[in-house]
Image: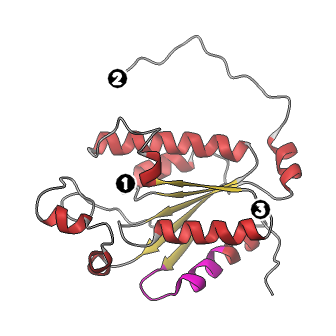
Amino acid sequence: MTKKSTHTVWHHASISRSDRESLHNHKSAILWFTGLSGSGKSTLAHAVEKYLHKIGVSTYVLDGDNVRHGLCSDLGFTDSDRAENIRRIGELAKLMTDAGIITLTAFISPFMSDRDTARKLVPDGDFLEIYCLCPIETCEQRDVKGLYKKARAGEIPLFTGIDSPYQAPEKPELTVNTQEQSLSASVEHVIKLLVQRGLIDDVRS
């Protein structure tokens, strides 16, 4: 592990988070979508972003696969690599929150301790954990990427839900049953949460 430098000092910007939020005309926060592969995290996150963009909210989705193409391309899927992957995402999401936008993350993030670490990076109320609840049987039936099939065949080791555990959130801010609810209904639940938390205005008709 690379030793952390002791010669860096945090530079305080002349523009504050509240200044940026005022510019965007809404509060910033992290929407942390978690769940098994195939549970609908990315689909829901992007659908929520599309809704928010339509009403003038500044957003960005940090998608698990996309991030592993660049920022985390050097990481594998061991427990320690997964923890480092989530640590980096948490730090990036924290910076984006300071930039005054709503950041949506779509990661399996299987370990409760890693999600809690990400939560603790930001003030209370800034981290909204959204659990995409879906039985593994349904996730396997969807399997649009063919990952479960490969994992069952032993081609993908340490696959979450097969030979690596998924620790479901105990007290998420929101649980969305993506097996029983339609995508539009799921989006509605997320938007309702954001309105209740005062992050956005209720512009629903």
- Quickly name the residue at label 3: 57
- Quickly name the residue at label 2: 1
Visual colour scheme:
secondary structure
Whether residue 133 is situated above or below residue 169 in the rendered picture = below
At x 32%, y 62%, the residue is: 166
Q: Are marks 2 and 1 in contact (CB under 8 Å)?
A: no
Question: Whole-Å distance between the Cαs marked 2 and 3?
Answer: 39 Å
Q: Earlier in the sequence, mark 2 or mark 1?
A: 2
Instruction: Identify the mark at residue 111; answer none if there is no mark.
Output: 1
Question: Whole-Å distance between the Cαs marked 2 and 1?
Answer: 21 Å
In the picture, measured across the screen, residue 42 lies left or right of residue 13, that is left
Q: Are marks 2 and 3 in contact (CB under 8 Å)?
A: no
Tell which tag, 2 or 3, sits nearer the viewer.
3
What stretch of residues is rendered in magenta? Answer: 177-190
Tell which tag, 3 or 1, sits nearer the viewer.
3
Describe the element under mark 1 as helix, strand or loop.
Answer: loop
Look at label 2 and name its amino acid: Met
Look at label 1 and name its amino acid: Phe
Q: Residues within 10 Å of mark 2 (few under 14, many from 20)?
A: few
